[in-house]
Amino acid sequence: MAKSNAELHLLIPGLLGPMPNLAASGRLPAIPLIERLLARADQVPVEGSDFPSTLFGLFGIEAETGHDLPRGAVDLLGDGMAPGDSFWVRADPVHLRPDRDRLLLFDNQLLQIEQQESETLLALFNRHFADDGLELIAPHPDRWYLRLAEAPDLQTRPLESVVGRNIEMFLPQGGDARHWHRLLNEMQMLLFNAEPNRQRELAGRVAINGLWLSGGGRLPRSPKPRFAAVCSDDPTALGLARLAAVDLHADERDGFIASDGATLRTWSALLSPVLNADPYLWIEALEQLEAEVASLLRQGGFRQLTIYPCTGRGYRITSGAMRRLWRRARPILQLLESNHP
C-alpha cells in the first residue's frame, strides 16, 4: 500500500452473510485474499448494522428519535430527481405470496418490471389515492417513491430486512400505524386487480401485488464531506454523495481512486443472494469480488483499506497490518458463524 493520504473504503453488504445454506450446498468460495485481509485487519466499531444505516453512518447522518433515516428523499436525489422540501417514502413494488398463515415478501429482483407496467400502475395509484394526498413517482421502473402531504407518525423497516420473510413482523409502527396498515391493504387490493397483473398472470409472471414503505423523511442538510469521491450505482450512495457535493462516479466497478482523501466504493452483488438465501449465486459473486479486490490492491495508490460488511464493524488494513503473518486466515464459513450466531 502506498505512503499517501489516499484511503479506500469498501462497503460490501452481504460479505459476511448470513448464508445458512452454505455448508449444505457442498461448496465453499475460493477467496484466500479476502480471508487473509479480514484476518490481519484491525476491527473497528461502525455506526449501523445493515446496508442503509451503515451508509448513512459513514456520512454522519443519524435518524432522529422515533423517525426513519430519510432514505426515500436521499434515494430520490440519487435517482436524479429533486426532492425539494417534500416528505418522501420509498415505496418499493414487491410480490406478496401467501404461505399458510403467513404473507411472505419477495423483492423487485423477481419482478423484472417493464416501463409500461410501471407507468400504468402509477397512473392507477395516483387516481385512486389523490384525495389522500399521496403521489407515487418512478424515475426507474422498479424504484418507486411516495410523496406525502404531511409527515406521519410512523417508523418503518428497510426492504432488506423483510425479503423472504413474514411481513407481519415488520409492518410500520407508530401513532399512525393503524391508518397506514389500512392503506397498505387498500394498495394491495388495487394492485391485485390491475390490468398489468392480469397480463402478467397470463404470461406466467408473478404479480406486482404490494408496496413496501420505508425510509420516510425530508432531505437532510448537507453533511460535512468525509469522502473525496464515491463510486457506486446504488441510489442511496449516489444521493448521499450528491448531498455532500463530492466527486461522483456512478459505477461501482469504476476503478477510480482519489489521489488525496478517502474514496468510498460500494459492492452490492452479494446482497441479493443473501436476501434470497442463494449460496450458489453468493459464492459466484464472492469470487468475483476476490478478483476485484486483487485488482484494486495491484492498482494501489492508497495507504489504508477499510472493509464494511454492514454488521456493525469495519476491518481496517494498512501495510503494517499485512505483515501480521502470525494471524492465520479463517475460512469464510467460520466468519459467518461468528458474525451471525
Image: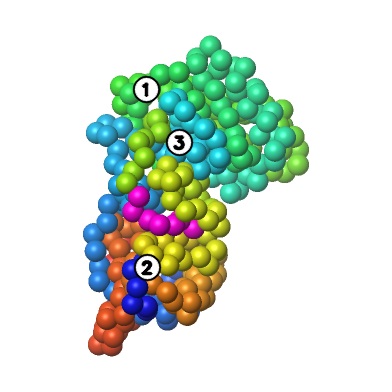
The mark total stands at: 3
Residue 228 painted magenta: yes
Tag 3 secondary structure: helix
The first of marks 1 and 2 along the sequence is 2
For label 1, count other residues whose C-alpha is less than 10 Å away and answer few (under 14), some (14-19) or many (20+): some
Q: Can you tell which of label 1 and label 3 is closer to the viewer?
A: 3
**In the depicted view, which residue is nearer to us: 154 or 58?**
58
How far is the residue under mark 1 from the one under mark 2? 43 Å
Point out the stretch of residues depicted in magenta: 225-231
Packing grade of label 2 (10 A; few <14, some 14-19, many >=20) is: many
Q: Residues within 10 Å of mark 3 (few under 14, many from 20)?
A: many
Q: Residue at x 40, y 57 (%)?
A: 228
Residue 271, position as x, y percentages in the image: 47, 57
Q: Which residue is mark 2?
A: 6
Asked if 22 appears above or below 183 in the picture, the reply is: below
* Residue 234 placement, left or right of 173: right
User: Which residue in the structure is indicated by mark 3?
Assistant: 72
Give, as a three-letter code, the residue at label 2: Ala
- Report x, y in % for residue 260: 39, 65
Q: Which mark is residue 80?
A: none
Is disc 2 placed on a helix, strand or loop?
loop
Q: Quadrant of residue 74?
A: top left
If the image is split into quadrants, where does the C terminus sit? bottom left
Q: Nearer the viewer, residue 309 or 176?
A: 309
Q: Nearer the viewer, mark 3 or mark 2?
A: 2
**Which residue: 37% across, 79% down?**
1
Picture residue at 36% right of the left edge, 35% below the top: 220
Q: In the drawing, what numbered circle is on residue 152?
A: 1
Q: Give, as a three-letter code, the residue at label 3.
A: Gly
The three-letter code of the residue at mark 1 reads Pro
Residue drawn at x 56%, y 40% is: 80
